[in-house]
Image (cartoon, grey):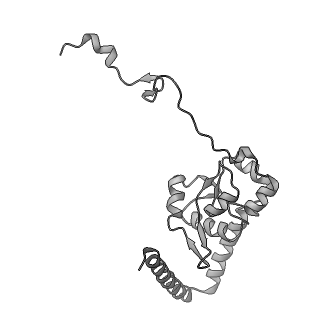
Amino acid sequence: MSSIATLSARAIARTTAFKTSKSRANARRPARHIARASADVDEALAKAQCPIADVKDTIGRGFVIVDIRSPEEWQEGSKSTWKKICLAVFDEETGEVEMNPYFMGQIRDEFPNTLSRILLVCDDGTERSEIAWRGITKAGYTQCKIIQGGSEAYFKEFPLTAADKRVWKLADQPGEDLSQLVSGVSMNMDHIFESERRF
């Protein structure tokens, strides 16, 4: 059995077990508590929506756009400055969606501080963004928003240019390697005491 098939079987088993245990737990809780919790999440999700007109201002306040679309969608159009962390990919042969099991780990690596300002973008700003938002906020991140309308609305309002696709890299600079300098002071003091050595 391939490792992907093993992972899929395990994921299905875990999902089934999770749904069963969750339904048992929900059966013990009064319906009003479940409805209230659901309403709170829906209200928070509604507040997390960032209209296209406010995107530039939101970025100006320190939010970083995280493109959660698939690598194939990135090829079709994405800005080089956006962080690219795929949430899921669609397998055209099988017709199934495969979730990225490392998504939250990649978010934590890229944004170790739970106060980081994250602005999610998928193709249309609905299902994938909501799934990612729920996972990220559940992990304790308090500054996570979703671009309303996703990349479709964003690129309609702010079309991609050649400069948006350009990846900037720093070229090697000629001259002395200054990587050992800290606050303008060399930590290597051997040259100062060289004449006074007696050993």
Of the 4 image quadrants, the one containing the C terminus is top left
- In the rendered image, the vertical position of residue 148 relative to residue 197, given as above or below: below
Q: Nearer the viewer, residue 182 or 178?
A: 178
Q: Is residue 52 left or right of residue 73?
A: right
Q: Position of residue 92 (x, y in %)?
A: 62, 75
Q: Position of residue 83 (x, y in %)?
A: 61, 53
Q: Residue furthest front?
A: 93
Residue drawn 65% across and 49% down? 80
- Figure quadrant of residue 181: top left
Residue drawn 48% across and 23% down? 184
- In the rendered image, the vertical position of residue 1 relative to residue 198, given as above or below: below
Q: Position of residue 160 (x, y in %)?
A: 76, 51
Q: Is residue 178 left or right of residue 135?
A: left
Q: Nearer the viewer, residue 152 or 187?
A: 152
Q: How many marks?
A: 0
Residue drawn 71% across and 65% down? 123
Q: Residue furthest left?
A: 199
- In the rendered image, the vertical position of residue 182 relative to residue 60, given as above or below: above
Residue drawn 62% across and 70% down? 131
